[in-house]
Amino acid sequence: MQTVKHNINIHEVGLRDGLQIEKQLVPFEKKMGWINRLFASGIKKIQLGSFVHPVKVPQMSDTDRLFTDVLKSGKKPENVILSGLVLNEKGLDRGLACGVEMFCMGVSASNTHSVKNTGMSTTEALGRIITMAKRAVSESKRVQVSVQSAFGCGYEGLISKNQVIDIVKSYLDAGLLTISLADTAGYAFPEQVTDLFGAIIELDNNIEPACHFHDTFGTGIANCFTAYQAGVTCFESAFGGLGGCPFTRISSGNVCTEDLVYLFMRQGLADLPDLEKLIELTRDIGQHLGRELSGRLYKTGLPNILKGF
Amino acid sequence: MQTVKHNINIHEVGLRDGLQIEKQLVPFEKKMGWINRLFASGIKKIQLGSFVHPVKVPQMSDTDRLFTDVLKSGKKPENVILSGLVLNEKGLDRGLACGVEMFCMGVSASNTHSVKNTGMSTTEALGRIITMAKRAVSESKRVQVSVQSAFGCGYEGLISKNQVIDIVKSYLDAGLLTISLADTAGYAFPEQVTDLFGAIIELDNNIEPACHFHDTFGTGIANCFTAYQAGVTCFESAFGGLGGCPFTRISSGNVCTEDLVYLFMRQGLADLPDLEKLIELTRDIGQHLGRELSGRLYKTGLPNILKGF
């Protein structure tokens, strides 16, 4: 029985990775309402959107305004960090201008995925991302760098562990310690998660490991649990299990935030977001989108066992 | 990284726990076709149905005939075991008469669940089940005894670990070594799985531990993985993730067979059923039932990473 527990935090990426493939545009005011409800839930890291070309991903065209208005509203709790995903220098400029607190950026460990997604090889993209990350750091911003397709690629198949480790080493050499491994295609399985996170956590005592799993093949929650056991402290997930990457061949949802919080709650972890508030929010989101989402807890409600009967 | 692997087997319970809550009766011939496709997949334990009163669960009214006809057909591979669930002596008589090869029976660790389900307290039910199990053994049948609601109860909430262990000890004292812990309400979480299976495996070197998880709150696959790590060798699951127990307050599906086989395949286990054949079967079942099932793999298909690209 595992006895040593460590605190974790949830990085809610539903507004970005959850919504980016939704064809129906979510109105700005609706997003603002959801963000305020995320604040009320106690989630401490929220990704408001990405800085991509508005024609390419129209759903993300209000990202700048979301940052500006949320920060202006004064409703953001002090301990909450607002993150934004940037793909290039232009995005970084926009993010710096509108007040992003944590920049997320990364490269794909799969060269094919990298070329299709960015037009650059992994090596080219890595140099560019590190330069961007250093600029954000010099502007006193938090930065999280990631390795996409770290657990396999929809185009290339297996991705070697060394390829991932080499990218992580480049990040560490550049002084970038907050590092996320992303399972873009949903291929990760528990033993691989233990192995890969074990290897990167060994590289540097000060590394802050984050994970980003998609639940394409049903292993999402098991992967998160294994990542927790390996020492991962930050978990990227999306309300209702929304989302998917439009640039991989099979797209499927992120690990579901409420379901993940439920897991950690049952495991006895402290300082978690309010599960009931998250469930209510996802119900509203499901209603707005007009379809059933993949998440479990928003359908079952808070289990009796957590209500004390 | 986990290196010691042990073989497992899948006990397909879709025809019983999967179908028993389906209102629309599945025609006998359809069930026969699905059983033959399960044979072709290489699954080695298949539960054909339960011996309950046909008025109470009409979907199970053809159980006797399924056994008779499957055995008569000569299509069952030699290494496949056909199991049936019995709730009482009358069911046992019926099962003995039609050729059941492995009898499954059990008691609920929750007294309230036991009374609602059987009209007997856990203690009364335990005595009766052990007598029945001994009779089946004396008829040279395999027997699996179970503890239902072992991880919590929809009525009673928490179930003490000692309550479960005491039931398991009674089984072991009676020489019954094949023992399944069932998560009837879907409340199990990984640490509890490790803890409870760890405790019962310690009781007897010759115990054959099985698990039966429902994926009500999204922890099903993670629980199976943790059970595997604890040493569990038999996994009860249902095609497509069908099913649920009609006698608990929140009913939800079993762990999905194809998704579980996928997990174990990725983990590198040997001698697993044919995943493609299982996926095709579940597609047919989903089409027959006319709705989307909770399983993932039958929707995504075999992942590219397993196809060698």
Image: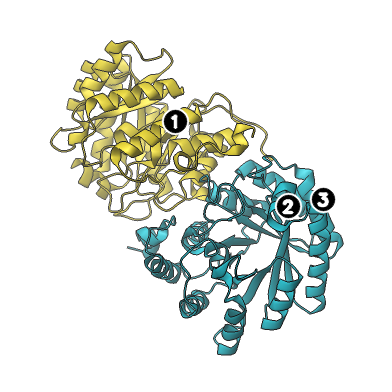
Chain colours: A cyan, B yellow
Q: Which residue is mark 3?
A: A166
- Say whether residue B183 is left or right of residue A273: left
Indicate the chain on which mark 2 is placed.
A
Q: Position of residue A148 (x, y in %)?
A: 69, 54
- Nearest the camera: A278 or A35? A35
How far separated are the C-alphas under marks 3 and 1?
Answer: 38 Å
Q: Which residue sits at x=55%, y=66%?
A: A270
Q: Residue furthest left?
A: B55
- Using the rendered view, name the quadrant where residue B123 is placed: top left
Q: Is residue B164 visible?
A: yes
Q: Amino acid at mark 2?
A: Val
Dot in front, 2 or 3: 2
The answer to whether dots 3 and 1 both sit on one chain is no
- Tell me: residue B81, above or below residue A291: above
Dot in front, 1 or 2: 2
Tell me how many marks there are.
3
Q: Which residue is mark 1?
A: B278
The answer to whether dots 1 and 2 both sit on one chain is no
- Say whether residue B28 is left or right of residue B190: left
Q: Residue furthest front?
A: A55
Q: Amino acid at mark 3?
A: Asp
Circles 3 and 1, Cβ within 8 Å, touching? The answer is: no
Disc 3: CA contacts within 10 A as few (<14), some (14-19) or many (>=20):
few
Q: Secondary structure at mark 2?
A: helix
Q: Position of residue A8 (x, y in %)?
A: 61, 64
Disc 1: CA contacts within 10 A as few (<14), some (14-19) or many (>=20):
many
- Say whether residue B252 is left or right of residue A93: left
The answer to whether dots 2 and 3 both sit on one chain is yes
Q: Which residue is mark 2?
A: A115
Q: Secondary structure at mark 1?
A: helix
Q: Position of residue B265 (x, y in %)?
A: 57, 33
Disc 2: CA contacts within 10 A as few (<14), some (14-19) or many (>=20):
some
